[in-house]
Amino acid sequence: MIGKIFPKISTRGFYDLKTGKSLKNTSYDIYPKTSFEIISQKSEIVIMIHGLRNNKSGALAKYVIAEKRLKYLKYPHDVVGYSYDSNTAGVQYKSTALHALRIGVTIAKKNGRNLSKFIKDLKSKNPSIKIRLMGHSLGAQVILSTIQTLAKNPKNYGIIESVHLFGASIPANSMSPKVHGNAFQKIVNKKIINYYSPYDDVLKAAHDEKWVDSPIGYRGTLGIPCKKYYQKQVKPQNHRFASYAKTIKSFP
């Protein structure tokens, strides 16, 4: 944290929580702007992307958890939050949860354009900065869509230093070279690490109900992944990021 306010990239209010429709043409907002003047001069940062059912305060809690854990592990660089419209309408009710999840996925996919724009803008200001992405649950979809967007231009190859996934809800075959693995292999410089758990009750339910096509955060990758992909089976108490954070033993 820089100063008293946690630095964050935000697209809150950019998308309709009931339909996923785009409401703004702006790429992203940054808060506070003074912090980003400092961040743009750093040698390395981590961007933490939260999951579904997080309002502004819920998202902030995830950034703080990430920062505390990484500091505990002696990681010396700053954590920046990425806040998006994941608190979709009806997500808390069983009768409307599936629709709300689908809208959440739509919004997460659209955020790939937003986050990729921030990454390119930051790199243009400081070409040597290392950018690591950390995503929990639906945050993995934001990362996947960001990678897909960046992979459209060869100039972006190696632009992201590493990717760290926790309880990821994207499909288990995502890291296959024939699916999205080639894009990850090109855009990520060092490694992609997937912390998965067959004990995750939320991902188990999503898998059993076929809400998500065999999530990679539940049983790990399906098929042969790209060469930079690694996975770790962990045993968090539940699906919450706070539980997954405790399973991180070293970083990056």
Image (cartoon, grey):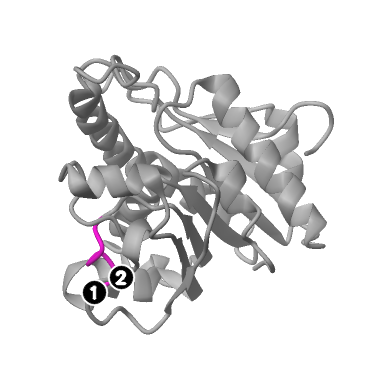
In this rendering, position of residue 109 left or right of residue 29 = left
Where does the C terminus fall, quadrant-wise? bottom right
Q: Nearer the viewer, mark 1 or mark 2?
A: 2
Residue sitting nearer the eye, 175 or 22: 175
Residue sitting nearer the eye, 109 or 72: 72
Q: Where is residue 137 in the image (x, y as percent from the top left)?
A: 41, 45
Q: Position of residue 21 (x, y in %)?
A: 21, 21
Q: Does the magenta stretch include residue 91?
A: no
In this rendering, position of residue 211 left or right of residue 133 = left
Quarter of the view holding residue 229? bottom left
**Mark on residue 199?**
none
The reply to whether residue 116 is in sight is yes
Q: Position of residue 221 (x, y in %)?
A: 30, 70
Q: Which residue is drawn at 26% across and 37% down?
A: 105
Q: Do the residues labelled 1 and 2 touch (CB within 8 Å)?
A: yes
249 lies above or below 203 = below
Residue sitting nearer the eye, 151 or 188: 188
Q: Magenta region: which residues?
A: 171-175
**Mark 1 residue element:** loop
**Mark 2 residue element:** loop
The reply to whether residue 21 is in sight is no
In this rendering, position of residue 56 left or right of residue 73 = left
Q: Name the residue under label 1.
A: 176
Quarter of the view holding residue 114? top left
Q: Residue at x 44, y 38 (%)?
A: 51
Quarter of the view holding residue 38? top right
Q: Mark 1 belongs to which amino acid? A: Ser
Label whose residue precedes the other's in the sequence (1 or 2): 1
Where does the N terminus fall, quadrant-wise? top right
Q: Where is residue 241 in the image (x, y as percent from the top left)?
A: 55, 43
Q: Mark 2 points at which residue?
A: 221
246 lies above or below 185 = above
